Image (tube, helix red, strand yellow):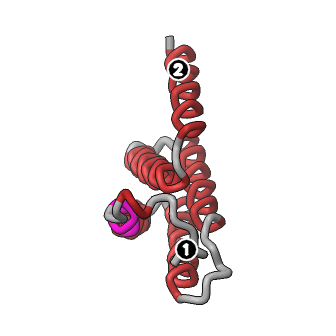
Amino acid sequence: MRGSIKSYRKVSLDSEIAVASPHRIIQMMFDGALLRLAQSRYAIENNDLASKGIFINKAIGIINGLNGSLNMDVQDSVASNLSDLYDFMLRRVSEANMNNDVAAIDDVTSILRTIKEGWDAIPKDMHHMTSEAS
């Protein structure tokens, strides 16, 4: 039963990604990172070290993906500042992993939520704009 649910979720996610705008994909990445951080926190609290490692690695992968999605060619400080924040979050998640530190997970969760709120506030008519658009 559990395998069937996982397979359904994967097909559902793959289907959503196939038709999603770039804006929506980033939203999904934020959601995924926040979910994995919550799961990591729960695993730490329950001394489930195997699950902690799995979920932290998934969170790190997503945060790296968010960092990699930044357009560093744009001549403003937004992408650079976000990259610095993502680097900080990666360090804090690594600290959480090494020290079983839920406070570090909470720090990263708070920062990600703030960035996600800003991303979610972008008006729908701007979701398909590129950095070249004026």
Q: Position of residue 88 (x, y in %)?
A: 53, 76
Q: Which corner quadrant of the image does residue 19 belong to?
A: top right
- Secondary structure, mark 2, is helix
Residue for point 62% across, 64% down: 69
Mark 1, residues whose alpha carbon is within 10 Å: few (<14), some, or many (≥20)?
few
Q: Which of pointers 1 and 2 lies earlier in the amino acid sequence?
A: 2
Q: Which residues are magenta?
A: 115-120
Q: Amino acid at mark 1?
A: Ala
Does residue 30 sit above or below 94 in this rendering? above
Q: Amino acid at mark 2?
A: Tyr
- Magenta stretch: residue 18 in it? no
Residue for point 34% across, 62% down: 123
Residue 44 - label: none
Mark 2, residues whose alpha carbon is within 10 Å: few (<14), some, or many (≥20)?
few
In front of the other: 44 or 93? 93
In front of the other: 24 or 10? 24
- Secondary structure, mark 1, is loop
Residue 133 - label: 1
Q: Label 2, on which residue? A: 8
Residue for point 59% across, 33% down: 14
Does residue 27 sit above or below 10 in this rendering? below
